Amino acid sequence: MNRPKLQDVAARAGVSVATASRVLNNRGYLSDDIRRRVDEAVAELGYRPNEIARSLIGQRSALVGLIVPTVADAFFGELATHVEGALAQRGYKMLLCDCHNTPEREEKYLDLLQGNRVDGIITSTHNRNVAGYGRADLPIVAIDRRLGEQIPTVRSDNRTGGFLATEHLIARGSRSAVHITATDHPGNERAAAYRERMAAHGLEARVMAYGFGASVDERRAAIETWLTVNPCDGVFASDDVTALMALDWARKTGRRVPEDLRIVGYDGSAALHTAVPGLTTVRQPIERMAVRAVEVLVARMTDATASVEQEPPLPVELRHGWTS
Amino acid sequence: MNRPKLQDVAARAGVSVATASRVLNNRGYLSDDIRRRVDEAVAELGYRPNEIARSLIGQRSALVGLIVPTVADAFFGELATHVEGALAQRGYKMLLCDCHNTPEREEKYLDLLQGNRVDGIITSTHNRNVAGYGRADLPIVAIDRRLGEQIPTVRSDNRTGGFLATEHLIARGSRSAVHITATDHPGNERAAAYRERMAAHGLEARVMAYGFGASVDERRAAIETWLTVNPCDGVFASDDVTALMALDWARKTGRRVPEDLRIVGYDGSAALHTAVPGLTTVRQPIERMAVRAVEVLVARMTDATASVEQEPPLPVELRHGWTS
DNA sequence: CTGAAAGCGCTTACAG
DNA sequence: CTGAAAGCGCTTACAG
């Protein structure tokens, strides 16, 4: 027999489809007898309501799309886990839109999500020029990315993060720390804070940008070349993976860490912390960011008139390890 | 104005809803004139077909559920990325079911997925006694886990993996390598291969099992205690994270790696390889496993009569690093 | 307290 | 080549 439908349940219980539906949804007044008969029929048939039909009626899919560069990255994997958890707790399912680090996929997913009538979108990619967001007419929340006036951004305190990392390196005796980041654009607050603190101490700031589109291998090569050519006694990397590249370079070239080279990373995902507990890093409150993004999104999904306020940045903290 | 529906498109193009639908789906014979008018109306209104309504008719949601212990783990994050990619390529969307390492969530998700009429499920968790799979009446593929006669399992060659790791340790001079794993049950082929090779070389096999439910901190504590109490000159860990715990313990206690302690991990995810390129590990073909799982699932989703054959295990390989 | 009917937004035979 | 009608599996006013 095929998957049972409400009709089958109703027939078996000897009631109308409408009544069976009411029992399932516990709406209106039902006699105990009918309630029991329907419940029995449901159990006997192993009936499960078709959520697709329900979505069509309710104009609500209870689906949220999460757009990430790739969940293979520790930071985004952890973010995805917590977004999923927070959504599930509130009765939403999550469609994972993994862009495999390409903007084309992001654009495609944006379209697909709307066709699938998701109730909202959380996006955490950093591609430039993805036009779709302007056209989208459904609630969106961005994580660590400005997408426009109408789209709230949840983020952590990048300025303080840059401050903490730089001050820490200097306090540990570094005089020539470099900041390594993907791109050194004006909105990069970590880089801005690094420059400011270096200047405040009368030290020369140097920012090494390996480029947004660089593959992992290209990034590693660029960093190793830079470090080999440019003497320095400290590295403030804009993410932990990059910091670990510097650490590996130090090992290969016989530099002592932290005596010759102090290293500070950024993000502080649990996965990398477990893998390399000794790495000093600026820890983003990944779970709080995920939960907050979900809270803001749910507020807008359940009340379309909810005002779009910009969120205050969430606090970061420095985690000390032996690399600095 | 509200989100346009097919009715609006039809009205604007001056055709019937049926005709508009045919243009969208490119079915039957349509005059060029009508085609053009409908296409224009679609563009002007920014119309996007409601996929939920389509699913209801087609009895096909184009949705697949991926059940993972947690995507915050490097291995499962990478697996999820590749499953997503392979599914997207074939026109399927992926609902991410992150169990946060608890069996209860898995059971709940199994139910939820069926209610949402996903077309199929890929599961990669390792919980015991999840009853739901027996009752489920839709295509399922398991990754590295036996779930019953009717459910195909995609996996890599664990026996060879255990063989390679153990032989490598011995070849590098280890005489007293320990195998560290979550649970040492009869079906654990990596442990079986380890025992067999140790015996073949006349060496004593010791398996340290930290327990399936152990938290990361508990695992680390258990491993450090064990290593401190039990002298050994090699570690074959059943995953990379565990191997890195041994590596960190060696650093903290002043053991030289690989001279005093040789370390081999397992999995070889790109994320951990990037973070710690020096780790010797048995590399699972994560992408191939993901793609194969999707292929097998799609075959069963598109042809319910497709036979359930057990898959040959995919090949693994040893990746050399400085830890051994 | 329960049922008949309309409708969610589409697609698909069936006529014409 | 195009349209009217039925139907996917439900829910929800509206009667009774």
Image: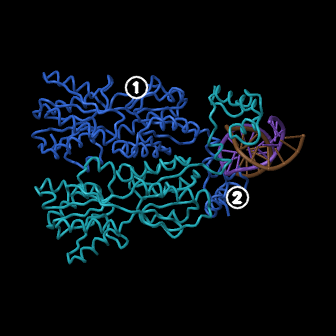
Chain colours: A blue, B cyan, C brown, D purple
What x and y, as percent, mark residue D2? 80, 35
Does residue A29 appear in the picture of this structure?
A: no
Is A91 on the left-hand or right-hand side of A160?
right
* Viewer-side label of 2, 1: 1
Residue at x 39%, y 39% (from the top left corner): A290
Q: Chain of mark 2?
A: A
SS of the residue under disc 2: helix
Q: Quadrant of residue B10?
A: top right
> What amino acid is labelled 2 in the image?
Asp
Q: Which residue is mark 2?
A: A8
Q: Quadrant of the C terminus of chain B?
A: bottom left
SS of the residue under disc 1: loop
Residue at x 13%, y 60% (from the top left corner): B259
Q: Quadrant of residue A48?
A: bottom right
Which of the numbered marks, if any, corresponds to residue A310? Answer: 1
> What amino acid is labelled 1 in the image?
Gln
How crowded pointer 1 is (Cα within 10 Å; few <14, some 14-19, many 20+) is rated as few
Q: Chain of mark 1?
A: A
- Above or below: residue A31 compared with residue B40: below
Is B45 on the left-hand or right-hand side of B136?
right
